[in-house]
Image: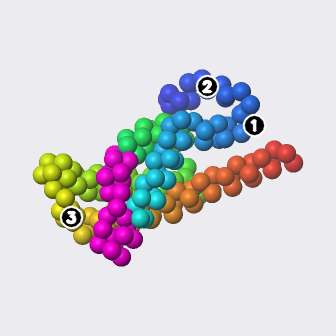
Amino acid sequence: MSDSRARAPRRAAPAGSAPYPRAARLRAPLALLVGALLTIEAGGGLVIFFARLAFGTTPGEAVHVIVGVALSAAYAAYQVGHWNRVAPFRARLDYALGLIAALALSATNLTGLWLGLAWWRERVVHASAAPVAYGTLLSAAHNIGSLVTLTFLSAHLAAVFRRDARARRALSS
């Protein structure tokens, strides 16, 4: 037992959450912040994606960049705590889906930060209102990564909730 987590005492669950510890974790401030930022990014990204294709405009681009930077930082902090709690990796569906979601979100955040740098140079450094010259492949990777993230994050959460429901049924039987 060289794993330090195996020796570390478990924190007590918040009052009223003992039967359903996941419910308390989903209400944790950092999880709520990541969820809110991801929701804003997803909605804003879809608007930007559609408007850019349909009208050649990018409404809400500044908000998307600023919230994207905040999401990148919040998600990194969240994922460190999450992985410390669920490690080591297990050969289960919820873990596989979570790993794909985490990798997709990390790649999407990295491409978003790179795109955000192009936006920063154009808007802030050069103080220009001209359209930002985003790289086509980088932009495509970001857009596709966003859709993969949302797909696998949703599937991961569904698999976790399903596993929890099965465990509750088994306990109540």
User: Does residue 97 appear in the picture of this structure?
Assistant: no
Q: Residue furthest right?
A: 173
What kind of element bears circle 2?
loop
- Tag 3 and tag 2, C-beta contact below 8 Å: no
Report the front residue among 88 and 110.
110
Labelled disc at residue 131: 3
Q: Nearer the viewer, mark 3 or mark 2?
A: 3
What kind of element bears circle 1?
loop
Report the front residue among 8 and 67.
67
**Residue 49 horizontal/vertical position (percent):** 37, 68
Mark 3 → mark 1, Cα distance in angstroms: 53 Å
Mark 1 sits on what residue? 19
Residue in view at x 54 percent, y 42 percent: 32
**Residue 5 horizontal/vertical position (percent):** 53, 30
Q: Residues within 10 Å of mark 1 (few under 14, many from 20)?
A: few
Residue in view at x 66 percent, y 41 percent: 23
**Residue 145 horizontal/vertical position (percent):** 39, 62
Amino acid type, mark 3: Pro
Report the front residue among 106 and 34.
34
Secondary structure character of the magenta stretch overall: helix
Name the image quarter holding residue 28: top right
- Range covered by the magenta-colored residues: 48-69
Q: How many numbered circles are shown?
A: 3
Mark 2 sits on what residue? 11
- Image quadrant where one finds the N terminus: top right
Q: Residues within 10 Å of mark 2 (few under 14, many from 20)?
A: few
Amino acid type, mark 2: Arg
Q: Residues within 10 Å of mark 3 (few under 14, many from 20)?
A: few
Q: Earlier in the sequence, mark 3 or mark 1?
A: 1
